[in-house]
Image: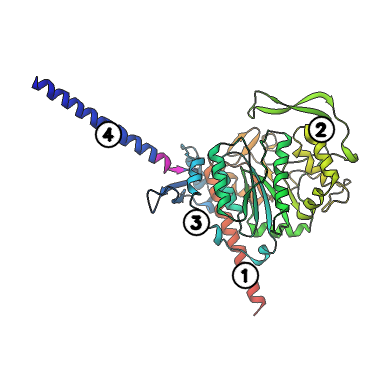
Amino acid sequence: MNLRCFILRLLRFKCLLLSLAIVCLFKFLVVHKKYSAKGGLLIEPYGNAENNSRIQLKKYDIDCSAIYKLDPMEVGKSLEIRHKNIIDLEDDDIVNLTSDCQSYKELRGHMHKPLSDEEKEFPLAYSLVLHKRASMVERMLSAIYMPHNIYCLHYDQKSSKTFIAAMENIARCFPNVFIASRLESVEYAHITRLKADLNCLSDLLGSVVPWRYVINLCGQDFPLRSNFELVAELKKLQGANMLESTRPSKQKRQRFEFQHVLQDIEFDYKRIPVKTAQTKAPPPHSIKVFVGSAYFILSHEFVNYIYDSQLMHDFLSWSADTYSPDEHFWATLVRVPGVPGEIPRSEPDVTDLMSKTRLVKWVYLEGSLYPPCTGSHMRAVCIYGAAEFRWLLTYGHWFANKFDSKVDPVIVQCLEEKLEEAQRHWVNLASEKTFWRYI
């Protein structure tokens, strides 16, 4: 009897030890996952361990200057990093990161970026239409943020609650970042995508910030120029707009010559506008339709002008049942005679390679118009890899798409470092010129 009791007690003790070991292992795995390499950033708690919002960011040990020079050893190192199991920051990590605004702003150094008088006198506005991947949004916003600019965030009403919380937190932390006053449930290639930008533009027009140009971006875009360089380029436009505007092919004309109806479909986006047999009436006001991209750089004068234009509102209503109206709306309006920064209808096409607004590498043009993608592809679009670092910065565009730290964290990290370096360089140079001018 005593032997039996002893054996039972021994078994209970072993079970207790095994349970404790399992609990410890589980906690280790959770902590390791949460505070390991995430999208190029190592996340570890500092200060009060109970305060999850206090986070220290560390980067991959990579030489971005060597990557720029296409050093084979460093490029190889970036490939090794990429082919490991990259654990990126999740939306809840961004919620935690931005829950303490003061700590977050100190961590990111947003309020202490070098800034020249030239930039202060030339503020910019941004319309950011977003729906997922809060980590990439945060990094993109950090790269373009300046305290004198203004930023409108439009998140999709269908976005996850955690993503929305992250966007709300970010907006709460800055006086010049805000959530659009009207939000759309955005559907792919639908009028709701265009309305999302229009909602932000309406809010930006009511802002007290005297912005000169407005730029729209999505969550997988990234800048290729520092704010100082971008302002210098925009000044050269002298009020002109920068966007793609070309004459439509016969195939593209079907997008707006036939009515389209939003339908459920077996597709990545689940619902898309589908062409019907019903032809549309000609566009109002005898508008000649041009096509281009959903992305633009528009002057304040142009945006203010079209918002007071009945032509714009009639054209918007006419475009409601077309396919991807954002890809003809802006391209057409900049060709309307008399608009500020007009591109005359008689002028040649402005292609995506001529417009510096946004650099996109299409799979079917790789090897002819530009070198092959070194990252991966998503729906015929390249997600850039680190080996494209130099090409991206020297091609001449101001922004590019697509980037994903889950595909290649090194390219995002190197762009961040290069832009910070360029901003310091140009602001210091401008300060030196001002100093010598007054002595």
Q: Position of residue 1 (x, y in %)?
A: 9, 19
Q: Who comes first in sequence, dot 4 or dot 2?
A: 4
Please tell me whether mark 4 sits on a helix, a strand or a loop.
helix
Q: Residues within 10 Å of mark 2 (few under 14, many from 20)?
A: many
Frontmost of labels 2 and 3 is 3
x 61%, y 65%: residue: 427
Q: Who comes first in sequence, dot 2 or dot 1?
A: 2
Instruction: List the residue tagged with mark 2.
Output: 256
Kindly identify the amino acid type of the residue bearing the numbered disc 4. Answer: Leu
Instruction: List the residue tagged with mark 1.
Output: 431
Please tell me whether mark 3 sits on a helix, a strand or a loop.
helix
Circles 1, 3 touching at the beta carbon (< 8 Å): no
Asked if 233 appears above or below 433 in the picture, the reply is above
Q: Who comes first in sequence, dot 1 or dot 4?
A: 4
Which label was assigned to residue 102?
3
Circles 4, 2 touching at the beta carbon (< 8 Å): no
Q: Image quarter for residue 387? A: top right
Of residues 5 and 334, the one drawn nearer to the viewer in this rendering: 5
Q: CA distance from mark 3 to mark 4?
A: 38 Å
In the rendered image, is residue 216 in sight?
Answer: yes
Which label was assigned to residue 20?
4
Please tell me whether mark 1 sits on a helix, a strand or a loop.
helix
Frontmost of labels 3 and 4 is 3
Kindly identify the amino acid type of the residue bearing the numbered disc 1. Answer: Ser
Q: CA distance from mark 2 to mark 1?
A: 51 Å
The residue most toward the front is 181
